[in-house]
Image (cartoon, rainbow, N blue to C red):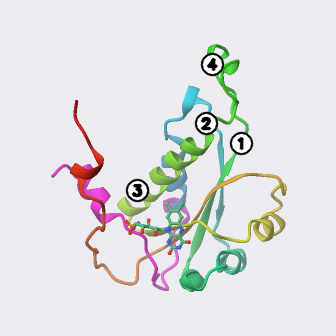
């Protein structure tokens, strides 16, 4: 098994965080990893908001608890928000496709880089898909029309158990030609 596949197996959605605070430097490394992600035309159509101040983190946790299943967010120690920014594409492609054509995929790549770096730092993450976007915009002075890529909860996992991955069979979803 490659080191990278091993990292992919260890990275899992963490839904129980310990009380240990997360070091600023580790959060910085996570966004550095996001910043290094590939993007269409290298447009890098993202920006990151890192919430680490306890009061702000507590408010964000409330915004993330739109669904009962996300109650665990009250124990998150930080959040990283991946925001979509305007993409400036290469002139050759600019007239063929819309500027934001690649952006959602680019933000996904940045999000995964962040989560994998967090795992290498011993941190747990959980990407949150449903949240009070307007509430977050108001809290963090983000323009209300801004598109979000992801809300990522961060903290130290409460335990070190690695769950078995539940995935479709590789043969079911892959073909070599
Ligand atoms: C776009 C997106 C939204 C997600 N939203 C939530 C969520 O709101 N709450 C949650 O507990 N997990 C959420 N997850 C985590 C997924 O449930 C998880 O990635 C999937 O079940 C695979 O498990 P693993 O991450 O542990 O490998 C989300 C993941 C993604 C990529």
Look at the numbered disc 4 and give the secondary structure of its residue: helix
Q: Secondary structure at mark 1?
A: loop
Q: Nearer the viewer, mark 4 or mark 2?
A: 4
Q: CA distance from mark 3 to mark 2?
A: 19 Å
Nearest the viewer among 175 and 124 is 175
Q: Is residue 32 visible?
A: no
Going from N to C along the chain, the mark reached first, 3 or 1, is 1
Q: Residue 25 at what x, y percent from top left?
A: 52, 60
In the image, residue 99 sits, relative to residue 77, either above or below, namely above
* Residue that label 3 marks: 116
Q: Does the rendering let one see residue 69?
A: yes
- Magenta segment range? 1-26
Classed neighbour count for the residue bearing mark 4: other residues with Cα under 10 Å, few (<14), some (14–19), many (≥20) = few
Residue 97: x and y in percent read 66, 25
Q: Which residue is mark 2?
A: 44
Which mark is first along the chain, 2 or 1?
Answer: 2
- SS for dot 3: helix
Q: Give the alpha-carbon distance from disc 4 to disc 1, as whole Å.
A: 18 Å
> In the image, residue 28 lies at what x, y percent?
54, 55
């Amino acid at each position: 098994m490659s080191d990278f596949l091993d990292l992919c197996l260890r990275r899992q959605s963490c839904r129980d965080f310990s009380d240990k605070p997360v070091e600023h430097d580790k959060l910085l490394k996570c966004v550095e990893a996001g910043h290094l992600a590939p993007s269409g035309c290298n447009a890098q159509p993202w920006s990151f908001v890192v919430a680490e101040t306890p009061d702000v983190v507590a408010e964000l946790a409330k915004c993330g608890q739109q669904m009962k299943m996300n109650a665990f967010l009250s124990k998150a120690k930080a959040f990283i928000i991946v925001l979509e920014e305007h993409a400036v594409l290469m002139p050759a492609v600019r007239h063929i496709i819309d500027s934001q054509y690649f952006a959602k995929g680019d933000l996904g790549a940045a999000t995964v880089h962040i989560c994998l770096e967090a795992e290498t730092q011993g941190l747990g993450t959980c990407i949150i898909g449903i949240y009070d976007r307007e509430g977050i915009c108001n809290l963090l002075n983000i323009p209300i029309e801004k598109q979000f890529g992801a809300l990522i909860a961060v903290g130290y996992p409460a335990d070190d158990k690695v769950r078995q991955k539940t995935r479709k069979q590789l043969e079911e979803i892959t073909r070599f030609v």
